[in-house]
Image (cartoon, rainbow, N blue to C red):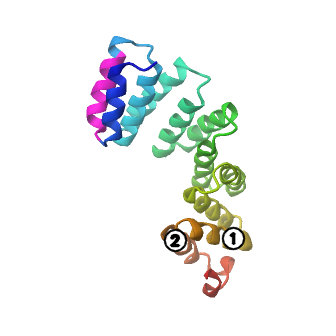
């Protein structure tokens, strides 16, 4: 059960006031040093502030307190990714996926890490699972399209482009622009986009 203090801190964090929530989470931890949720939320607040070293430290403590928490491993993996520590991110996110096979968010985050590492086959595998679990998630669909470009899977890219366009047309245009420019021969002619 969450205390009133961490509930208040989470509410402040949700209002895009992460600096204030950091202070409240730190106070909650000083009162209860084994408070998993406070460490988890503190890590997320630090990550929002782009203070990745502190985010990773808090999230590592959350993982130590609850090693079977897929959410804690997921959040730690995302913080590692944001800090450009991709190998550590992949390790944390693989653990998150192993703990919760139904977490589309964890599969999508792991796919994003593999994209950052140019491991397109692994990225596509994770992102395909993510879109099975979250078929209306335009971001996961977008990143799957990016993986298909890396794999030079022209037809699969165009199918993904159509899916992303049906969900969020602006994102589809970004997908097309980002990958069409550099990979004209892989993707085919511009006339195919409509």
**Foreground: disc 1 or disc 2:** 2
The residue tagged 1 is 159
- Cβ atoms at labels 1 and 2 below 8 Å apart: no
* Residues packed near mark 1 inside 10 Å, few (<14), some (14 to 19) or many (20 plus): some
Is residue 8 located in the magenta-colored stretch of the structure? no
| Residue plotted at (65% across, 33% down) | 95
Q: Is residue 104 left or right of residue 181?
A: right
- Residue 18 place in picture, x, y as percent: 31, 37
* Sooner in the amino-acid sequence: mark 1 or mark 2: 1
The residue sitting at 30% across, 31% down in the picture is 21
Residue depicted at 48% across the width and 22% down the height: 61
Left or right: 73, with 12 as reference point: right
Q: Which residue is mark 2?
A: 169
Q: CA distance from mark 1 to mark 2?
A: 14 Å
- Tell me the magenta residue range: 17-29
Residue at screen point 71% across, 64% down: 151
Q: Quadrant of residue 28?
A: top left
In this rendering, the answer to whether 177 lies above or below 6 is below
Query: How many discs appear?
Result: 2
Q: Give the secondary structure at mark 2.
A: helix
């Amino acid at each position: 059960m969450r205390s009133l203090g961490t509930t208040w801190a989470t509410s402040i964090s949700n209002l895009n006031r992460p600096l204030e929530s950091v202070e409240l989470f730190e106070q909650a931890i000083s009162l209860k040093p084994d408070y998993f949720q406070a460490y988890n939320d503190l890590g997320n607040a630090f990550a929002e502030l782009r203070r990745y070293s502190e985010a990773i430290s808090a999230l590592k403590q959350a993982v130590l307190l609850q090693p079977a928490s897929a959410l804690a491993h997921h959040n730690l993996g995302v913080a590692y990714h944001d800090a450009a520590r991709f190998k550590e991110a992949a390790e944390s996110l693989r653990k998150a996926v192993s703990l919760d096979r139904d977490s589309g968010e964890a599969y999508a985050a792991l796919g994003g890490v593999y994209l950052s590492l140019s491991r397109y086959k692994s990225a596509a595998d994770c992102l395909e699972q993510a879109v099975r679990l979250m078929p209306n998630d335009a971001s996961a669909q977008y990143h799957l399209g990016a993986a298909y470009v890396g794999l030079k899977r022209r037809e699969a890219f165009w199918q993904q482009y159509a899916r992303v366009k049906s969900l969020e047309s602006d994102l589809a245009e970004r997908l097309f622009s980002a990958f069409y420019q550099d990979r004209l021969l892989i993707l085919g002619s511009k006339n195919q986009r409509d």
